[in-house]
Amino acid sequence: MPRDVLYTPQSIEALDYDRDLGDPGEFPYTRGIHATGYRGRLWTMRQFAGFGTPEETNERYRRLLAAGGTGLSVAFDLPTLMGRDPDHELSRGEVGKCGVNVTSLADMEALFADIDLGAVTTSMTINGPAAMLLAMYLVVAEERGTDWAKLSGTIQNDILKEFIAQKEFIYPPRPSMRLVTDVFAFCASHVPRWNTISVSGYHIREAGATAAQELAFTLRNGIEYVDYAIEAGLDIDVFAPRISFFFNSHSDFFEEIAKFRAARRIWARVMRDRFKAANPRSWQLRFHTQTAGVSLTAQQPYNNVVRTALQALAATLGGTQSLHTNALDEALALPTEAAATLALRTQQIIANETGIVDVVDPLGGSYFLEKLTGEIEDEAMAYIDRIDRMGGMVPAIEGGYPQKEIAESAYQFQRSVESKEQVIVGVNEFVSTVHEGIGTLYIDESAGHRQLARLDDTRRRRDRSRLNAAIDRLQNGAKSESNLMPLLIDAVKAHATVGEMCDGLREVWGEYVEDPII
């Protein structure tokens, strides 16, 4: 975004404190949703982790918790994200490589072995099969005698951004949205502390969107979920307080802080004025942040520590409720334990050594920051209004609109890098011929072999007639208006695999094939 050389009181003369800012904890929450900020409670330090088998990932989780982590965040491998079992032909060579493989209830049990699910918050980054993985988590909790009402965490469950950016969809948009709202309704009644969706701008930004586009498309996705949930008969003040968001913290320091502040303001006004929500918790935008993976470089990888620290600082100054810091080696591989621990230490240093937690919204009132917050809000609202005129985000996605906008932004950014208008230290300027060798984590094929063996054991031990009956009920439910969560839980208890549950719905709803964006 274009910037002036200097900002003065005249830059924000149209700003009204009560209308546009308010004190922290007060509408429109520009300065934060909590009156005491981090003095009352620090953000959750939730390191995203998953690789290989559930046992290997469980060991990493327990070490991160022992190192001071305060929440878990599950990274699943590509077969799991796509709803495929390890023995599917498309899974070959991918099992356990970019995350942990979870195929059946036995895997979920191993993933959380010796971890008290009632005492830790868990975030699961999965979308197409989100309802299936949540069903597995709930069954594990039930087996251990943990009351579902005590479970706290988040299932990403954001299918719209898959169509826009990440492309890990399974079913067409409209039946996919039905799965999302079924999770909303079920958890409102049975898992009240669970965040039923994490509307994700992170992947939209990673695909090449600008800060304003990330904000606009993410919040408009959130509006779409609210529309669909209301149409399904849900009370907005019952489900809306459990909607959370997930943003990227990129490298333009002040722009990112302004983006987070604008996000709270827009969402508060949309929920109160557009949807007439009466509960103030429905107005409050709560979000997790991850530092920008796309900003990491394979060249001079130790520079990534600096990038991540500054991005994490922007996230905390912007008021995030939860944070993941990327590791220095993630442009090369999944992080080693040492790199993941250093990433966690980055958060701990910010929290305990910088003093930023002592004051709520310490940059509030900056002429530059307040002007920038307003400009990002205006640009984001222009996109939201345009999508409204298209009939909503689902028709916009079907027409390829957000995909085209992001593709153009990504192209323009790459041109700026190649022309050196945008400097990337160590890549197009300040380049070094000295190779900085670092150790990386390598996932061999043994994880795949072990997962195939456990899958064979699961299939051999289970009651086939009980399984078939559960899948039949799931398919019949998909043809009706029944909530599918109880049917998925029954299928999990019958030891159905992720692939079998997803395939059952594929037979009813079909698979989505994207039209190329030209």
Image (cartoon, rainbow, N blue to C red):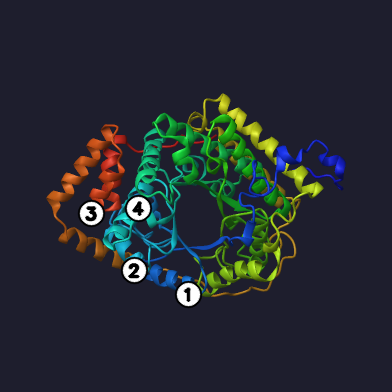
> Which callout, 1 or 3, points at the residue further toward the start of the chain?
1
Are the residues tagged 4 and 2 within 8 Å (C-beta)? no
Q: Position of residue 277 (x, y in %)?
A: 53, 34
Mark seen at residue 113: 2
Q: Is residue 183 visible?
A: yes
* Residue type at the position of mark 1: Ala
Q: Position of residue 86 (x, y in %)?
A: 30, 57
Label 4 environment density (alpha carbons within 10 Å; few <14, some 14–19, many ≥20): many
Q: Marks 4/2: CA distance?
A: 16 Å
Q: Measuring 43% from the left and 63% from the top, which residue is drawn there? A: 120
Mark seen at residue 493: 3
On the image, numbered disc 4 is attached to which residue?
A: 133
* Residue type at the position of mark 2: Ala
Q: Marks 1/3: CA distance?
A: 31 Å
> Which callout, 3 or 4, points at the residue further toward the start of the chain?
4
Q: Measuring 21% from the left and 61% from the top, which residue is drawn there? A: 458
* Residue type at the position of mark 4: Leu
Are the residues tagged 2 and 1 within 8 Å (C-beta)? no
Q: Marks 2/1: CA distance?
A: 15 Å
Mark seen at residue 66: 1
Instruction: Look at the picture and state if 458 lies above or below 188.
Output: below
234, 213: nearer the viewer = 234
Secondary element under disc 2, as helix, strand or loop, is: loop
* Residue type at the position of mark 3: Lys
Is residue 83 shown left or right of residue 289? left
Total marks in image? 4
